[in-house]
Amino acid sequence: MDNNGKLWNSNYNKVMVTNFCLYFAFYITMPLLPIYLSEHFGATKDTIGVVLAGYTLAALLVRPFSGYIVDSFNRRKVLLLCLAANCLFMGSYLVAGSLFLFTLFRTLHGGPFGACTVANSTVAIDVLPPNRRNEGIGFYGLSNNIATAIAPSIGIFIYQQTGSFEWLFWIAFAVSIVGLVCDSMVDVPLKEIVKNKSKISLDRFLLTRGWMIGINVVLVGFCYGVLSNYLAIYGKEKLGITNGTGTYFLILSSGLIASRLLGNRTLKKGLITRNCGLGLMLSSFGYGLFVFCQNPVGYYISALLIGLGNGHLWPAFQNMMIGVAHHNERGTANSTLLTSWDLGIGFGVLAGGLVVEYTDYHQAFLLMFAIHCLATFLFCLKTKAAFMERKLDQKLS
């Protein structure tokens, strides 16, 4: 392995490319799926919420076990198996000719995708030199931030030019295969697998030391679930912005990238709670602007603020979760973080669909803003103190 204290080593770069491919393939179709389900299958708004939530539910169910598997078996083999399954299900959308089949494939796809993100992020930590780990975790997220910056815009552009969702599904399938090929060339360091002979318990699958962090991530994920899944229809029906969804995600992801680069300076110093608090406040202000300033100016400025906020808070939450985990619990720590995010996204998609069906979009986004404010207060009052008490690395603050 070519670590030798080098952050941008070849193994880390390949893992970054794979992470980009995973999220690019996911986000190139995500903002348009509600429209696809509505136009091709005649799905109602609450049905769309249920269909999209199925994917997240499957990922949610699989991730706790995938963390345990990643910690208990050969990580490279687990990762490649999960990536191969992800490719298979990505291609299944091309043959889904009914709402039932699409729902089935979409739900089942959540399993391998959830396992891939856990395994790949854990391998990324393994190939990083220890003295660059906090910084490397922060940069790792840039790969999916860049994917989320360009994938929705590319997807919307292709759809506008071709009017075909089939093109998008083929591109997503091809990009997934590229990710599989890249990770097949990663040299993962072999580590002795310590078998846990204790009785099966919750802490084998979820990092119970990080439960407060997990709750905070659930609340943040809820808000993003509402925003990302109903933004396109809301902009089109309520604000008359027919071609602005791609621009919105581009601005949001640009904010994510900028804050990742700026925030890594404080992450390198171990000041992760400062990054997290700043990110939560920026995002809360952005969500508030989105809800109460219903015009194109507020719409696009909110994207920048939410992007800046999430770019600060996500790597901070990940470092916090890793910071309260032992070395043989990295997979479990990553799966706990991502499970919390999935749970929040799933609740957000489902609750958003129900609120929209029985009231309107404004009420759904008002709920989103309230939940994010709650997440900010919870971090300041409880989560930060819980982390400071349980952290294993005394250099972190």
Image (cartoon, rainbow, N blue to C red):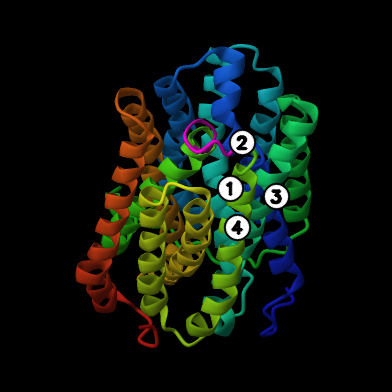
Return the residue at label 4. Answer: 251
Q: CA distance from mark 4 to mark 1?
A: 27 Å
Name the kind of residue labelled 2 in the image. Answer: Thr
The disc label shown at residue 386, or none: none
Question: Which quarter of the rendered picture does the N terminus lie within?
Answer: bottom right
Labels 1 & 2 near each other (Cβ < 8 A): no
User: Which residue sits at x=78%, y=39%?
Assistant: 174
Do we see residue 81 in this rendering? no
Labels 4 & 1 near each other (Cβ < 8 A): no
Sequence-earlier tag: 2 or 4: 2
Labels 3 & 4 near each other (Cβ < 8 A): no
Sequence-earlier tag: 3 or 2: 3
Labels 3 & 1 near each other (Cβ < 8 A): no
Return the residue at label 1. Answer: 116
Name the kind of residue labelled 4 in the image. Answer: Ile
Q: Residues within 10 Å of mark 2 (few under 14, many from 20)?
A: few
Q: Nearer the viewer, residue 186 or 395?
A: 395
Which residues lie in the magenta part? 235-242
Return the residue at label 2. Answer: 242
Q: Residues within 10 Å of mark 3 (few under 14, many from 20)?
A: many
The disc label shown at residue 21, or none: 3
Q: CA distance from mark 3 to mark 1?
A: 11 Å
Q: Magenta residues: mostly which secondary structure?
A: loop
Residue 240 within the magenta-colored segment of the rendering:
yes
Q: CA distance from mark 3 to mark 4?
A: 20 Å
Quarter of the image where one finds residue 226:
top left
Q: Position of residue 138 (x, y in %)?
A: 55, 71
Sequence-earlier tag: 3 or 1: 3
Do we see residue 378 in this rendering? yes
Sequence-earlier tag: 3 or 4: 3
